[in-house]
Image: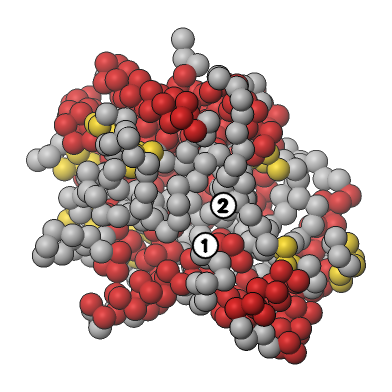
């Protein structure tokens, strides 16, 4: 593994992470770094955290407070809160403003450029963050510069970053790509996995494992030695997802599920079963509704399923929900941890293929063969459990009920994108994409309109890209071209009206904005920028 550049200031940050003692300086005062530790906000701020997050009049977005930067050491803030005991709305607001630097979403960046491609090139600098110099609140310091998605998302995000890198590649930003891959390798080395994002409240879960695809992208630019350079990190990530695979007693343990005929596949999971700090009120309300509908459920089960859906990146979607007697999907029916997802297992197949390639290049043929065999076995299990011959589509699999969920979603294109499908399967998948998903603005994430953001009427850049590339892998070029043009046209039309690129788009009614979910549509936006640059600059 290539050693990451470490300057003195970052070394200080690293010492903070490992509990060593020195001093750093904030804007307001010098703070003993022993008082600043890598803790989630509920542990940093105690009672104050719960008082703020349970009060929806203080911050409409639950993520705002957990991203706030403390002006004093957290223990000093806790002491002051206990002494001052602010009660009214005005008193609480004054206390928070006095003791925290409250973040604002950067949603107002515009350009007078008529070129969307030039706008994106300028946005890279707007969205770029320098290496982090100190621990501040919940932010986990990273050793190298990185790109954030934008809006309320002020930190790096795992799976977003692959699609952002596609655009960085088109714009010749190789150094930025390398820095981001090095950051992810550092996170794996430090924590044993890549968290959802570089926040302490994300340290109990990951996101869809695209690190192998990032390494592949960098290898395209800098050569095959990249595979061996990042081989230890790739191996460690695989170990994280397969933790528990050697446990013969349990059907499911963390992210591993053992199926009746001995196959091993994976699910999304979260190591905690409490409300997400960044969505605290919303999770508490969902758990209350879930228990009202089904008294046999526990709050902990609901919280775990909500968190596992967050690990999937599809938070939230009909993929994880049950349909009721009225034909509706309710968030309180969430049961993510019962589901073996097609996207996750396709990505792990790709990770195993990448490990085999890395070990071949490292002249370790025995290890390479181990991972070729693992990939082969996973591919067979995906075909056996997740492909539905009757409908000609890949569905997620509910291992508790021993059947596919029957919920159409664009997760079904991952076997095309990662070349798991056979030729006849690709033909039938292409037919389904055209008949079930194709809309005026591109592909809809699912055909179900549930009020959740990963359902109709929304379309998302990464899903368009993987669908287009997946179809091209099997020479379905005409449909790929049609999807590409519809998506680019939609992006261009919205940009011409607003000079913005959005997190998601309404692909059904092009006169309306996207919606659904826990927060308003964000602009910026990392993966939309990346996919647009990649698709629009094709010859």
Please state the horizontal and vertical placement of residue 179, each as a whole percent of the image.
69, 37
Q: Nearer the viewer, residue 397 or 146?
A: 146
Would you place residue 522 above or below residue 32 in this image?
A: above
| Residue 196 shows up from this direction | yes
The answer to which of marks 2 and 1 sits earlier in the sequence is 1
Residue 256, compared with residue 333, is above or below; it is: above
- The answer to the question of whether label 2 and label 1 lie on touching residues, with beta carbons closer than 8 A, is yes
Quarter of the view holding residue 444: top left
Up the image or down, 122 lies above or below 52; here it is above
> What x and y, as percent, mark residue 103?
66, 57
The residue tagged 1 is 61
- Label 2: state its secondary structure: loop
Near-viewer residue (47 or 306): 47
Apparent side of residue 440 relative to residue 205 in the rendered image (left or right)? left
* Residue lying at 46% horizontally and 72% vertically, measured from the top left: 281
- Could you tell me which secondary element the residue under label 1 belongs to? loop
Give left or right: position of 111 versus 318. right
Q: Can residue 182 be seen in this view?
A: no
Identify the residue shown where x is 19% and y is 25%.
Answer: 427
- Relative horizontal placement of residue 332, taking residue 76 as reference (left or right): left
Residue at 38%, 55% in the rendered image: 517
Tell me if 129 is positioned left or right of 430 in this view. Answer: right
Q: In which quarter of the image is the N terminus?
A: top right
Q: Which mark is residue 152?
A: 2
Marker disc for residue 252: none
Query: Dividing the picture into quarters, in which one does residue 124 lie?
Result: top right
Q: Nearer the viewer, residue 356 or 269?
A: 269
Q: Which of 445 and 337 is in front in this view?
A: 445
Q: Distance between the residues labelled 2 and 1?
A: 9 Å
Task: Identify whether 264 is placed above or below 525.
Answer: below
For the point 47% across and 41% down, the residue is 503
Q: How crowded is mark 2: few (under 14 residues within 10 Å), some or many (20 or more)?
A: many
């Amino acid at each position: 593994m290539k050693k990451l550049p470490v300057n003195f200031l970052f070394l200080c940050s690293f010492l903070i992470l490992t509990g060593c003692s020195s001093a750093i300086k904030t804007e307001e005062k010098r703070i003993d770094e022993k008082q600043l530790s890598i803790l989630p906000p509920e542990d940093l701020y105690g009672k104050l955290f719960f008082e703020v997050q349970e009060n929806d009049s203080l911050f409409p977005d639950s993520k705002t407070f957990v991203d706030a930067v403390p002006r004093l050491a957290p223990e000093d803030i806790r002491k002051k809160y206990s002494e001052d005991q602010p009660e009214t709305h005005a008193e609480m607001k004054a206390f928070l403003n006095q003791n925290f630097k409250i973040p604002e979403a950067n949603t107002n960046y515009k350009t007078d450029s008529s070129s969307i491609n030039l706008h994106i090139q300028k946005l890279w600098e707007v969205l770029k963050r320098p290496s982090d110099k100190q621990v501040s609140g919940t932010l986990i310091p990273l050793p190298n510069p990185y790109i954030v998605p934008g809006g309320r998302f002020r930190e790096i995000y795992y799976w977003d970053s692959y699609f952002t890198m596609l655009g960085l590649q088109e714009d010749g930003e190789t150094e930025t790509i390398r820095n981001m891959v090095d950051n992810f390798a550092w996170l794996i080395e430090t924590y044993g996995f890549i968290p959802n994002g570089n926040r302490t409240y994300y340290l109990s879960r990951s996101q869809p494992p695209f690190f192998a695809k990032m390494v592949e992208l960098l290898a395209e630019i800098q050569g095959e030695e990249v595979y061996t350079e990042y081989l230890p990190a790739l191996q460690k990530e695989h170990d994280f997802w397969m933790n528990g695979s050697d446990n013969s007693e349990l059907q499911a343990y963390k992210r591993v599920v053992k199926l009746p005929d001995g196959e091993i596949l994976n699910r999304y999971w979260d190591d905690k079963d409490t409300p997400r700090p960044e969505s605290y009120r919303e999770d508490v309300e969902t758990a209350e509704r879930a228990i009202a509908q089904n008294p046999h459920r526990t709050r902990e089960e609901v919280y775990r399923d909500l968190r596992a859906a967050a690990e999937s990146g599809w938070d939230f979607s009909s993929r994880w929900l049950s349909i009721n007697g009225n034909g509706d999907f309710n968030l309180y029916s969430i049961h993510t941890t019962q589901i073996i997802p097609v996207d996750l297992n396709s990505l792990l197949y790709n990770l195993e293929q990448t490990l085999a390639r890395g070990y071949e290049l490292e002249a370790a043929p025995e290890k390479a063969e181990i991972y070729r065999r693992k990939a082969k076995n996973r591919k067979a299990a995906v075909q056996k459990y997740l492909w539905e011959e009757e409908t000609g589509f890949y569905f997620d699999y509910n291992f508790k009920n021993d059947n596919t969920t029957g919920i159409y979603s664009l997760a079904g294109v991952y076997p095309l994108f990662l070349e798991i499908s056979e030729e006849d399967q690709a033909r039938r998948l292409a037919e389904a994409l055209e008949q079930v998903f194709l809309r005026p603005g591109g592909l809809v994430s699912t055909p179900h309109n549930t009020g959740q953001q990963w359902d109709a009427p929304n379309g998302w850049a990464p899903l368009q890209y993987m669908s287009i590339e997946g179809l091209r892998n099997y020479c379905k070029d005409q449909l790929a071209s049609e999807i590409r043009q519809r998506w680019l046209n939609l992006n261009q039309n919205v940009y011409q009206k607003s000079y913005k690129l959005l997190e998601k788009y309404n692909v059904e009614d092009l006169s309306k904005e996207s919606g659904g979910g826990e927060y308003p549509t964000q602009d910026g936006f990392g993966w939309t920028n990346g996919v647009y640059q990649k698709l629009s600059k094709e010859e």
